[in-house]
Amino acid sequence: MAGPAGRLDAVVVCGGQWHDFDYARLQLLTALSGYEHVRTRVFEDYNCLEALASADLLITYTCNRVPDETQQEALIGFVSRGGRWLALHGTNSAIDRTPPGSASKYVTPRTMGELPQVLGSQFLGHPPIAPYLVEVTDPEHPFVSGVEPFEVTDELYVSELHPPIQVLAHTRFVGESRGFEEGHTTVDKPRPVLYLKDHGAGTVCYFTLGHCRGRFDVQDLGIDDLGRVDLGSWAVPEFHTILGRCLSWAVTGVVTAPLQIG
């Protein structure tokens, strides 16, 4: 953990499929550069056991990067011993393509062992990207204090939840996660967007927002050039406000008075 001079060691894991990880990585590293006592090592997947063993904080922005059994144990151990894990967007996803002719294109296999119980959730599916409203669940919590309901155009995650979790912000959705085998809902209830999950001596902060995609990020789906750039929630001021507060917690371990919006 933190050295005698106050240095903190951070691990950032940013990589996977179907997103602009270059953009997300740059945003996260730029934000971390504001903390002069933080030293950061960056990886594309969870092959970072040596760095994780001495890390104080972990930030992950991934999609379909499934840690193997040894890596799962290391991630669980990191949180258990008091680590702070800021998990963003598709960190909780494991996605496989289905054979041709199947009713759905994607399945979400349970291949992450006990890790979803530590993360608090596992991705099941999302409807087509479209605007939706994010509302604050716990207006007294510093992560979301003063934030009014706001609209994002992002992937709305329907996930298998592993309580207890402390939900801070949510959205609502009823309908189909088109293309996915799971994630179809008929019950109108809050869907967590931001929550905290304690495990052992540590805590996971999970923030589902943050979709971004460049023109050339879905070539494996047969689309050579998407023809547009999607910044998703990264274009929304409230997203940056909440992300900044969560990042401050990941660095300091303290939930303090909220940073100013904007």
Image: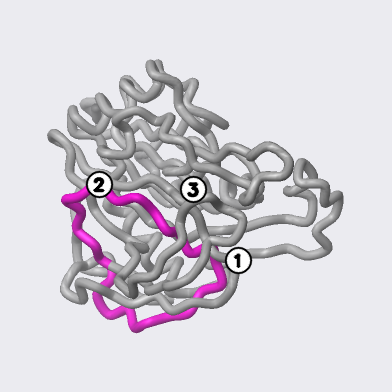
Drawn side of residue 138 relative to residue 222, left or right: left
Task: Check disc 3 and report the residue beneath it.
Answer: 90
Disc 1 packing (10 Å; few <14; some 14–19; many ≥20): few
Query: Does residue 138 sit above or below 40 in this rendering?
Result: below
Q: Is residue 22 visible?
A: no
Drawn side of residue 204 relative to residue 91, left or right: left
Q: Is residue 191 visible?
A: yes
- Label placed on residue 51: none
Disc 2 packing (10 Å; few <14; some 14–19; many ≥20): some
Q: Are marks 3 and 2 in contact (CB under 8 Å)?
A: no
Q: Residue at x 35, y 31 (%)?
A: 9
Toward the viewer: 249 or 176?
Answer: 176
Q: Residue at x 31, y 42 (%)?
A: 119
Q: Residue at x 34, y 71 (%)?
A: 187
Give how far across and how far down residue 184 sits, in percent.
46, 61
- Label placed on residue 128: 1
Segment tinted magenta in the rendering:
144-168
Task: Check disc 2 and report the residue beneath it.
Answer: 162
Quarter of the C terminus within the rendering: bottom left
Q: Amino acid at mark 1?
A: Pro
Query: Does residue 140 sit above or below 18 in this rendering?
Result: below
